[in-house]
Image: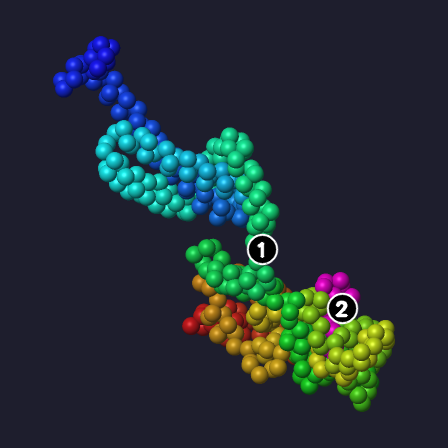
Amino acid sequence: MSPLGEAALGPPGGDPPRGGRLAVFEDDVLYALASVSLVLFAGLMSGLSLGLMSIDKVELEVLKESGTESEKKCARSIMPVVENQHFTLVTLLLCNAAALEALPLFLDDLTDPVTAVILSVTVVLLVGEIIPQAVCAKYGLFVGGRCAWLVIALRVLTAPVSWPLAKLLDWVMGPNKTVLFKRAQLKAYVSLLDQDRGISKDEVAVIIGALDMQKKSAIEGMTPWDKVFMLSEDTALDENVLWDILGKGHSRIPVHRSGDRKDILGLVIVKELVLINPTRRKKVSDCHMRSIPRLPANAPMYDLLTLFRAGRSHMAVLCEPPKSTGSDSPDKSLALGDPLGIITLEDVIEELLQGEIVDETDKFVDNTQTQKVQTALLLARLPQNVKELLRFTRARSFADHSSKFRWLTRSTTATSLPFGSDAARTPLLQSLEGIGNPGLSPSDNGDPLGDASYS
């Protein structure tokens, strides 16, 4: 050994001098810190590879618009990183491989080769693979948002190698495509949502109903022709007919030609009949009738909703679709068959909600008139918060209506009613007196919000 070596490390076979031992200790500490840093760096690259590659650009756009402030900030930071996923992937894998390959070089100077191999395998597997990927799989958005600047810097440093490899992947594999759900896939995804995610069953039903609107045909929500209440054009609007119209509870009534129920002339708006004097026996044909569209029964439900929203009509007659003749004649749309039923805006909304809407005058729940309305049963199925709301509103609204009806029954005179006859006025006043009778409970008065309805 040279004199310089003996001065630094001591004579051969003897203990190194104090200064030499200090230098060896410092080298060991540096090698240990370098080894730990390489393991942590390799783990970070491995975790970011899993976390960033599992984040879709559509998901980031959603989080940018509807996420929390922290999620919005992370999404904006990650968006430039995932724009070119192949470039980011090659960069992370290249840095991970470089760190893992450099680790044994430092471990060899700290321990014997066997121990170095064991440490490099176990420590890298646990700290460099399992733990980082488990963390980034769950918190990939937040870890990626905090480390986005580091990934961008590494892409710049490794660009001479990673950028050509990324372009090669783009040419071989093609660019990464954004994952978008098809209609059936979106329905399946929405059906998996539950209240734990803040979405109720009714909201899920509405979303699925909206997705099905374009595929559903109008015939699925129509009222069959034999169940439709109509008026003949020569029907006289006397007291009995008016009470019959009032009892049906419809807002629009189709009018057919005398002797032919399939020949629809138009429809009348029920509220426009309120001032008709029944003693004059005015015919329906003398009233103002509005046109009613005739549509094929296989028309998409969503197209009907668009038509009804235009305001021209909230009712349509559904007819047999024209038979296909193979010709493109413009007159083919006029060759509709016999009417099959009618459909209204309420029917379309029921298909959207995937449930029946029952109003105050309905006697049947469904359009086929096979299931009668059971108000107590329907109210018993309501959520508890809605029941409490109804209990609160019943107590106040019933008292207000009672005072108004008592005033009306006491102040109404024969000359103030358009009917002009006691016979026509009596049923109305009797019904109002019954509703305004303070001696009746809400349940006795036919109020569906009474306590008996909830039992």
Seen from the viewer's position, the closer of residues 414 and 333 is 333
Q: Is residue 236 left or right of residue 409?
A: right
Q: Which residue is drawn at 45% across and 40% down?
A: 93
- Nearest to the eye among marks 2 and 1: give it: 1
Q: Which mark is drawn over residue 313?
A: 2
Can you say whether 122 is above or below 311 in the image?
Answer: above
At label 2, which amino acid type do we have? Ser
Give percent across and percent down for residue 6: 20, 12
Q: What element carries label 1?
A: loop
- Is residue 281 shown in magenta? no
Image quarter of the C terminus: bottom left
Q: Is residue 444 left or right of residue 268?
A: left
Give percent across and percent down for residue 5: 23, 13
Q: Is residue 391 left or right of residue 354?
A: left
Q: What element carries label 2?
A: loop
Kindly tell me whether residue 400 is visible in this rendering: no
Provide the residue span drawn in magenta: 306-319
Q: Name the residue under label 1.
A: 180
Q: How crowded is mark 2: few (under 14 residues within 10 Å), some or many (20 or more)?
A: some
